[in-house]
Amino acid sequence: MTAVAAPASPGLHTQRFSVAVPVVLAPMAGITNSAFRRLCREYGAGLYVSEMVTSRGLVEGHPESLAMVRPEAPGGITSIQLYGVDPVTIGQAVTLLVQRGWADHIDLNMGCPVAKVTRRGGGAALPWKTDLFTAIVRSAVAAARRAADERGEAPPAVTVKMRMGIDDDHLTYRQAGLIAAAAGVSWVALHARTAAAMYSPSARWEAIADLVALLSGTGVPVLGNGDIWSAADARAMMAQTGCAGVVIGRGCLGRPWLFGQLAAALTGTPPPGDPGLAEVVAIMQRHALLLCERYGQDRGCRDFRKHVAWYLKGFEVGSQTRRALGMVSSLSELADLLGTLPADQPYPVAVVAQPRGRTTPARPVALPQGWLDTPTLEQRHAHELQQAEECASGG
């Protein structure tokens, strides 16, 4: 691959807003709730996208879905990831978000690889049906523009996040990128793996470069996603592929300060180093507090448990203490346990480049029967699509 220079003036610019640092937090089910997004935002500039919300859940007024998108405080850019398989429902959900002033950015989930989504034709399976994909993206863009015009304001950005395709024999990213650009999206983000690849082996950054070249004449930027564990990785991806920005997923698990490092590196200043254990302990307590403020102490502490191993990855912490932290049930108990740690340890830099979070190996993709027979939607798949949004908001 021929290396190209990273963009001289990074940033994401839309009719509605501009973000000086072209960094986007990837939606992750059960992770990127409002507490985690607030914590990441405290460390650096960027765009912080909500957990996946189903379009049907919004349109039908499900309390959980509405709670996930309702802004908790004024100010800032509100960014929602929307999942759906029906163009009409997608349009209605976008209209609701814009009319209520709940979204400056709406990201369409076209890349989820998990079986409960793809086996019903959603997520990474959907772009294979080019007519359905086209109708959904056009509906979302049109609804956003129409609702914003009625309010007398600039339309929110509508974007698409996708994978390379279902598998190597059924790649969809090139045609999907062209369709999305023609529909008027603000950018497309490409996770450089197929759905079959899941989260290993390594992301194929050459696909990002390919999409950048393909869309270069459309004016639609491409953001890259996959295997960014450090600020150096982000710069390398942008230099090697020419992408306009990066989407950060697993790399920030247990490392919310990564966004500060990215903001520095992409604006030409030396990024701060990783914190020692004393500072990590303080960050852990801050994260747990935000969760408890959002959900109450019982649910907040239970939610925090999954983050413990990511925060303490590589530090010398006794196995009994790790187990106890993994079952913590109150903020005071968390403080007591964290207070026993040898806090003078420096950050174990060797773990920065090690995968964290999901490491699911490659496997066949669950699909509706006959889904791959034709790239256009068939009536026989109506039943699966009717069930596709029965998975709860948040994944």
Image (spheres, grey):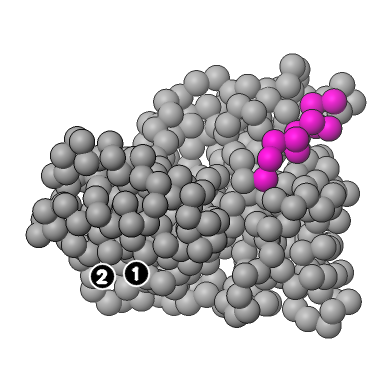
Mark with earlier residue (1, 2)? 1
Which dot, 1 or 2, sits closer to the camera? 1
SS assignment at label 1: helix
Q: Residues within 10 Å of mark 1 (few under 14, many from 20)?
A: many
Residue plotted at (68% across, 25% down): 119
For disc 1, the marked residue is 260
Q: Is residue 171 above or below residue 289?
A: above
Q: Residues within 10 Å of mark 2 (few under 14, many from 20)?
A: some
User: The residue under label 1 is which amino acid type?
Assistant: Gly
In this orientation, which residue lies closer to the viewer: 228 or 244? 228
Image quarter for residue 33? Answer: bottom right
Q: In the rendered structure, does residue 280 fall within the stretch colored magenta?
A: no
Residue 228 in view (yes/no)? no
Q: Residue furthest bottom?
A: 152
| Image mark for residue 42 | none
Q: In the rendered structure, does residue 387 fall within the stretch colored magenta?
A: yes
The answer to whether marks 1 and 2 mark residues whose Cβ atoms lie closer than 8 Å is: yes
For disc 2, the marked residue is 271
User: The residue under label 2 is which amino acid type?
Assistant: Pro
Q: Main secondary structure of the magenta part?
A: helix
Q: CA distance from mark 1 to mark 2?
A: 7 Å
| 167 lies left or right of 42 | right
Which span is picked out in magenta? 383-393
Residue plotted at (78% across, 53% down): 58
In this orientation, which residue lies closer to the viewer: 163 or 96? 96
> How many numbered badges does the structure rendering display?
2
Q: Is residue 241 above or below residue 358?
A: below
Residue 278 rendering spot, x and y as whole percentages: 18, 62
Residue plotted at (75% across, 44% down): 84
In this orientation, which residue lies closer to the viewer: 331 or 32? 331
Residue 23 rendering spot, x and y as whole percentages: 46, 64
